[in-house]
Image: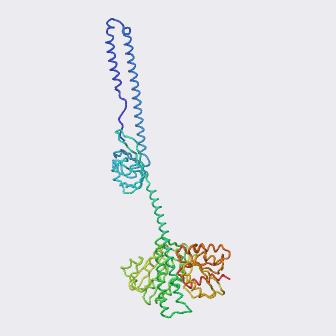
Amino acid sequence: MEPRPDTSVKTRFPPYRRFVRGTAVALAGLVLWCAPSAAAEQPIFEAQPFAVTLIALFFVAQLIVIVVLLVARVQRARAAKTLHESEGRLRRAVLDAPIPIMMYAEDGEVLLINRQWTELTGYTHAEIPAVDTWTRKAAVRKRTDVGDGPASRGAPERNQSDGECVLTTSTGEQRVWDFRSRPLGRLADGRRFTISMAMDITERTRAEELRTAKQQADAANRAKSEFLSSMSHELRTPMNAILGFAQLLQDNPKEPLRPPQKEHVQQILKGGRHLLDLINDVLDLAGIEGGVVALTIDDVAPQEILAECLDLARTLADRHGVALVDGATGRELPAVRADATRLRQVVLNLLSNAIKYNRDGGRVTLGCKPTAGGMLRVSIADTGPGIPPQKQDQLFQPFRRLGAESTDIEGTGIGLTITKRLIELMDGRIGFETEVGRGSTFWIELPLAADKPAGEGAVTAPQYSPAGGSKKAPARGHTMLYVEDDPANRKLMAEIIGRVPNLTMVSAGSAETGLELARERTPDVIVMDISLPGASGFEALKRLREMEQTRHVPVIALTANAMPGDVARGARAGFHRYLTKPVQVEEILAAIEDALEGVS
């Protein structure tokens, strides 16, 4: 702010000079007026009483005027001092304020910036003498507008707006300030001036942006999860009919196929299962990348999982003429922290790759040992052709088969990608060593369970077993209710159940019709789809449990809703079994037999 002129009282002042001049004039007039009386030797007061009285009054009036002027001058001096002190206090308050403050004139001259402004931006008053200089150096740009203020170039009267602005400090850091400006009046030279206050809201803005980004990410993940679930359902439903009827054709004791027909059906099953594997892998990879894969990390005993994986891989190894060497099971192995189901998936994938990409008469060796870094290493070594150096960096990239796409080896090119993502989600590591012409060794490492001896307190996932033959027929006649809206799937189930003696199937195309049939027929077992027109399978199960006559009837879910969340929800809902499409004929028959075992 500009300094005010000094208004202190001086020793000489105009009223005094006026008083002296007035007195001299009055005395001169009195002398001239009273000269005749003096010549007559007559006293002045007797000769000219009116003149004397007038002069006396004049002197008194002059004294009164002088006193009044003196009092006014003193009051003005005191007011000026008070104003000066007030301005000083305001200046100190502005300088010491805990928020950034700028005062500037209407022509853009910066009159004052306080210490907080300088501390937060790094700019001194000398560096930003004008508002234009400030906005240029700090690269001020608007985020929101809320009113009149100094956030953009020029004076506030020049269509500026208060609001949130992004600015750059002298160190290059970007901050967000919320400006508010108000006019204060005029300077001594007549210019209007304004005070602009700001609040640094950078951290609050970042928190809001993070919260918004998280909400958007959550919404995207939910949308992706819903899309994956929908795609899984839509792809699995037709595959159920394709693979189901192909299985019935392949194994039909009443009308056995001729050799060429059997080969054709085997090709249908082979292509269908390969397509199903591709669907599963693509959906699995999309789910992992979308963050919709839920892992259950627990203390897991690796011996049982490794033995089971070897058993499941043996059929594939026999078909390819590859020997499996077990160098892991039968030993005391410490428990690891992992998801048992996903660990099985990882080991099976590595074993499958080692078998498929091996040479005729080759060998696959499974090994397992603890490492010095508190991890358990599982290794799968093969005697295949090895991986050329120029292709090794593509190994874990999706849909890269490194030349195998030109061979008859089945694969999707994303198995290793899924394996790597799953291992990393379980806080593990994956790697490989390879030598062209001699083979490759892929290994995974998982953290050991803390303070757990081998196998103690560890768990494994439910066991998988290769499909076996048909189960025995029920001892007496039973009724099965099948609730399914797809006609092809109802026909498929009718063909399957038609081959089982003493078991009669009735069907319904909706949950409502199924509930009516269940109330009328009281079936011994119910097989139910989940995605039905009207009420869902979950709602139908709840209503079945509420009815006295169907409360104890076992209900098996048979659905294309195969995402991990769907399976977990089915388990919580209380289904006897939760089977996913495409179904294996032996699997559904085994589930029905198991459900009927407790039926008298």
Query: Is residue 248 toward the left or the right of residue 356 in the image?
Result: right
Q: How many marks?
A: 0
Residue closest to the eye, 402 or 458: 402
Image vertical order of residue 187 relative to residue 220, above or below: above
| Quadrant (top left, top right, bottom left, bottom right) of the C terminus | bottom right
Question: Which colour assignment does the render follow?
Answer: rainbow
| Quadrant (top left, top right, bottom left, bottom right) of the N terminus | top left
Image vertical order of residue 243 relative to residue 512, above or below: below
The residue most toward the bottom is 258
Picture residue at 52% right of the left edge, 89% below the top? 250
Residue closest to the eye, 375 or 413: 413
Residue 403 percent coordinates (x, y): 38, 82
Residue 592 percent coordinates (x, y): 61, 82
Residue 76 percent coordinates (x, y): 40, 31
The residue most toward the top is 40
Residue 531 percent coordinates (x, y): 55, 75
Picture residue at 37% right of the left edge, 29% below the top? 9
Picture residue at 51% right of the left edge, 84% below the top? 243
